[in-house]
Image: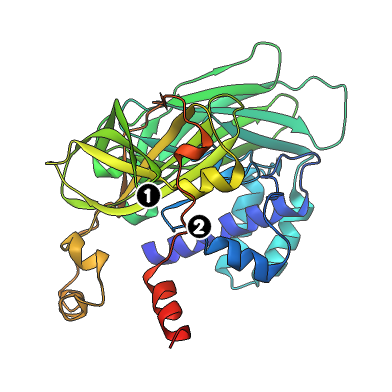
Amino acid sequence: MKKQRNKLEFALAGLVLACGLANPARGQAQPAANPALPNDQSKSIQDYRKYPEESRPLHPGSWDLLHPWSSVGTPMRPMISQQAMSQAELLLKSGRPQEEVLSQLKMLSSPLSYQFELNKAAFAGTRDELQARLTITLAQSSDAALRIHVIKSEMIGDKYFGSPNLGAVPFSCDTAGPACTFTWRAPSADKKYWGILKLQVTLAVEGVADQFAVRQLFYSSPMVAGRFTGEFQERMENGSLVIDAGVNVEKHMVCFVSGNLFSADTETPTHHVMRRMIVDPSMKSISLTFFGQVFRDFGYQGAFRLQDLKAQCENLAYPPEWFMDSVAHKAELEEFDKKPGRAPEPQQILFEYNTYSYTTRRYGNSAFSDAPWQSSSQKNGLEISNK
């Protein structure tokens, strides 16, 4: 019965999303295309191979890399009354096709739309606070003043842990407009607060008989794998800039550690670093290498600023070394998969959210090496071609 209920909830969520996509908001901000990348495919591949995977040029159009914590603005979505949603659920239970139910929902949609704006897309630790601003508007332009009344606001946990109700969410509403702001922090590092959480708000609109339930998803990692300390040291190594970022690590695990480098003089993004590595409580710092040839190729010089530090870690039930080299540990992984089911645990956890940055001393462009990078496959290919 519970499995059937989850299927219905998933189908209804998909139908609501489809309704929203059918009426996209005009002027909705989207990540810009990357104007700095070459159009010619062969040239693109050639340029891509010039630099190591862990340290690459950062282009102004790479929105997701430049804003690793930010939330892309959600589109305006149609508000569907609870009565209409109940009718849709009955239709799905009766075996009606989702396309037919979607058509019914569109006809039952109200002239109201809603939009959530989040301060971030992901939250790490128990001090990191969600701020979600909800705005209600009429689908058609109108001078009519809307007034909303929040009946209930609650947080719903991840389906992975059975979608538990995590309690009420505090809010405050504007006195002169149909908008409310909801704030929430994970009360503890308990795993029930981990995952894709759902802010669910039940509300009424003055002059409209129906009640509405609006929802917004976000990612929460209340337990943390570690934290950056805000301590930094810089050095040159083989013609590349290396910045050691201080860390406190909670446990031995695999993490993807990233950061961005900018010109402190022009605010131009220069490098994106992403390291796939094993971290351990014995570590005091993580080294981030900004490849020298990128500086030389793009003419970067002066002082540079490291920012946007983030670490996402795999919460594995087996040694992280197996993850790092799955080929060498194939037999162990296959044997592990044969073991009986394990209790659900968070699959990925983050380092605690931070806003640290570090500005380097000044460098001339010639301080960096223009020596090209060669991967092991490139070296092997060169050796073969020379035979």
Give the total number of marks visible in the rendering. 2
Separation of residues labelled 2 and 1 (CA atoms): 11 Å
Mark 2 touches mark 1? (CB < 8 Å): yes
Residue bearing mark 1: 163
Comparing 72 with 213, the one in front is 72
| Residue found 42% across the figure and 24% down from its top | 361
| In this view, 153 is above or below 371 | above
Quadrant including the C terminus: bottom left
Q: Position of residue 171 (x, y in %)?
A: 50, 21
| Residue found 81% across the figure and 37% down from its top | 139
Q: Label 2: how many residues lie within 10 Å, few (<14), some (14-19) or many (20+)?
A: few
Q: Which mark is residue 9?
A: 2
Q: Is residue 277 left or right of residue 218?
A: left
Q: Report helix, strand or loop for mark 1.
A: loop
| In this view, 338 is above or below 93 | below
Disc 2 residue type? Glu
Q: Position of residue 306 (x, y in %)?
A: 43, 32
Most distant residue in the left direction: 282
| Residue found 34% across the figure and 56% down from its top | 160
Comparing 327 with 53, the one in front is 53
The mark that comes first in sequence, 2 or 1, is 2
Res. 75 visible in picture? yes
Disc 1 residue type? Ser
Res. 157 visible in picture? no
Q: Kindly indicate the quadrant of the structure image that contains residue 321.
A: bottom left
Q: Kindly indicate the quadrant of the structure image that contains residue 98.
A: bottom right
